[in-house]
């Protein structure tokens, strides 16, 4: 059985035909239209191209799933608002796709799709699963008993917007001290600049400096990882999930990130000293493919 | 159909025969044995007395549910550890009760029981439900799709142990800056003392002073409610639940607590401006009976 996953980003639309438990048959990457209203037409073109190239008839496709970088209505199948794409409001994207191809179409936000993607790697057996993505912000997706936690308004799982420093840095969401103001890659870069790094600083450059033995980079990363760990520890205390997975491009740094975070959580979270069944924390496995693979599995959630 | 709920506290054991959707037929209150190992025997006596007085044969009782102020193993039906009761470790309480009366027996921690009790007042229809109890600490219970969120080790829902002030006050759990260090009634009393209140200060006395027009009491309460609201806002951003219910003895203050907290959450949480389906925050309805009523409903969770 094949499904198509579409991962709409601010810059590119990624698409893939996905088979079985997350195997990508064929994928593509196309610039995102400047005008959000043109997205449905573009996505239809992408699907036509992709199935054409793969020589797969649309009748072999069970469903299309779409991930968007913003708010959507999972029940109505609409994009409500993507603040990073111009004119990207109130778009009936699922209806357009269903009508064109005669397949079911589903939508969810990108973090939920990425969570679902990573969850497939756990063979979809994890009874409770928290995905945290470190990037421009801190996103999240929570899967309990195989179901994405969407809340009453499809907006649940905004783990980046829990406050770890009351009255701290102002956040775009309107609060102060949100976790993402300290634990995102954006925050890491800001912290590095505050520590004296200049020029073209990025998450990657800071980790590269550290690898070269730069002490200041090491200190900045250590402090940043403590911020990351505080929120992860909160997730353990709230959910005691089977797994917490850390994703986002920066998670490619692997154990440099994982070990201190896991150690902190092990030390400070509420644990079960009796059965010793405690949360396993790991790094993502799909990295940039998590979104597109997860989108292709949205049909399991509806 | 009748069930028995038992709410074991550090000082008293409350018990009730509960009918239908939370109607208490008869209840009792007995001092908790000093030695935790004597609890099963005491609970058996309480059940015998209660059913005797109510002239109800044990065959009319569908199940017994037990709430404990500590860690339990919901699957094995055992008390793992109640730190506030001496010698209260590794007690096979459900087995003792089942063997004595031939009924099913279930166990969970007191905050989960209280959550379940309040949930019955919502006619058990709330699709997602977060209960927060403000008392000696800050406890919580989360019910999603009718199921208590227990996590892999029965320790989920420890909402009092999310950090709202990194590197803040030291908490008993080992972390610093946990929500309960700022938002519990214990914290309110500490904050009042820091503001100059002396003598026999309690949550009740501070609210009484405020009611008499004491400005300092008003300021202390305002600051405390901001701490309460920060964590409530975190709960909205994580779960976007249908309802958040605030319980604990102090919640009898009603709107004095509810209004500023709801206003803060309305202002600072991530909202759905599209469908306007947002979390409803309310004060508990059962107060001190939540635990015993909820315990009687534990059979619905197993």
Image (cartoon, coloured by chain):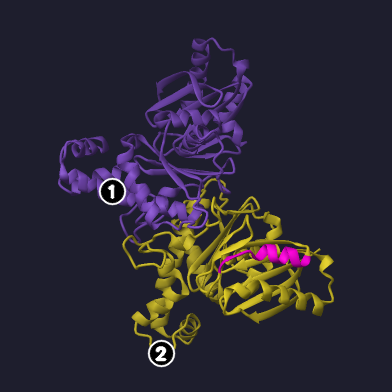
Chain colours: A purple, B yellow
Judging from the image, mark 2 belongs to the subunit labelled B
Q: Is residue A194 left or right of residue B256?
A: left
Task: Residue under label 2, please give it.
Answer: B199
Do we see residue A33 in this rendering? no
Residue plotted at (16% across, 39% down): A213
Residue plotted at (59% across, 54% down): B242
Do we see residue A46 in this rendering? yes
Judging from the image, mark 1 belongs to the subunit labelled A
Q: Is residue B135 above or below residue A186?
A: below
Question: In the image, is residue B90 part of the stretch drawn in magenta?
Answer: yes
Compare residues B226 and B277 and report the one nearer the observer: B226
Q: Is residue B93 above or below residue A46?
A: below
Q: Quadrant of the C terminus of chain A?
A: top right
Task: Residue under label 1, please give it.
Answer: A224
**Quadrant assignment, res B62:** bottom right
**Residues rendered magenta in the picture:** B89-101
SS assignment for the magenta stretch, majority: helix
Compare residues A15 and A24 and report the one nearer the observer: A24
């Amino acid at each position: 059985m094949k499904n198509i996953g579409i991962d709409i980003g601010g810059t590119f639309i990624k698409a893939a035909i996905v088979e079985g438990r997350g195997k990508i048959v064929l994928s593509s990457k196309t610039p995102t239209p400047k005008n959000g209203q043109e997205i449905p037409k573009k996505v239809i073109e992408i699907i036509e191209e992709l199935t054409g190239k793969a020589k797969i008839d649309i009748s072999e496709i069970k469903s299309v799933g779409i991930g968007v970088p913003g708010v959507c209505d999972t029940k109505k199948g609409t994009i409500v608002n993507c603040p990073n794409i111009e004119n990207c409001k109130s778009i009936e994207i699922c209806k357009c796709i269903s009508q064109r191809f005669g397949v079911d179409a589903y939508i969810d936000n990108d973090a939920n799709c990425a969570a679902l993607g990573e969850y497939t790697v756990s063979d979809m057996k994890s009874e409770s699963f928290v995905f945290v993505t470190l990037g421009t912000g801190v996103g999240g997706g929570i899967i309990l008993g195989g179901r994405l936690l969407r809340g009453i308004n499809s907006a649940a799982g905004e783990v980046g917007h829990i406050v770890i420093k009351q009255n701290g840095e102002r956040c775009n969401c309107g609060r102060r001290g949100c976790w993402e103001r300290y634990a995102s890659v954006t925050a890491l870069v800001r912290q590095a600049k505050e520590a004296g790094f200049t020029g073209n600083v990025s998450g990657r450059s800071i980790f590269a400096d550290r690898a070269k033995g730069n002490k200041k980079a090491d200190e900045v990363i250590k402090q940043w990882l403590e911020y990351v760990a505080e929120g992860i520890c909160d997730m353990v205390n709230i959910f005691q999930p089977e797994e917490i997975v850390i994703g986002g491009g920066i998670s490619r740094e692997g154990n440099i990130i994982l070990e201190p975070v896991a150690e902190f959580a092990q030390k400070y979270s509420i644990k079960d000293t009796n059965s010793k069944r405690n949360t396993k924390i790991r790094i993502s496995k799909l990295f940039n493919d998590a979104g597109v693979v997860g989108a292709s599995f949205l049909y399991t959630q509806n």
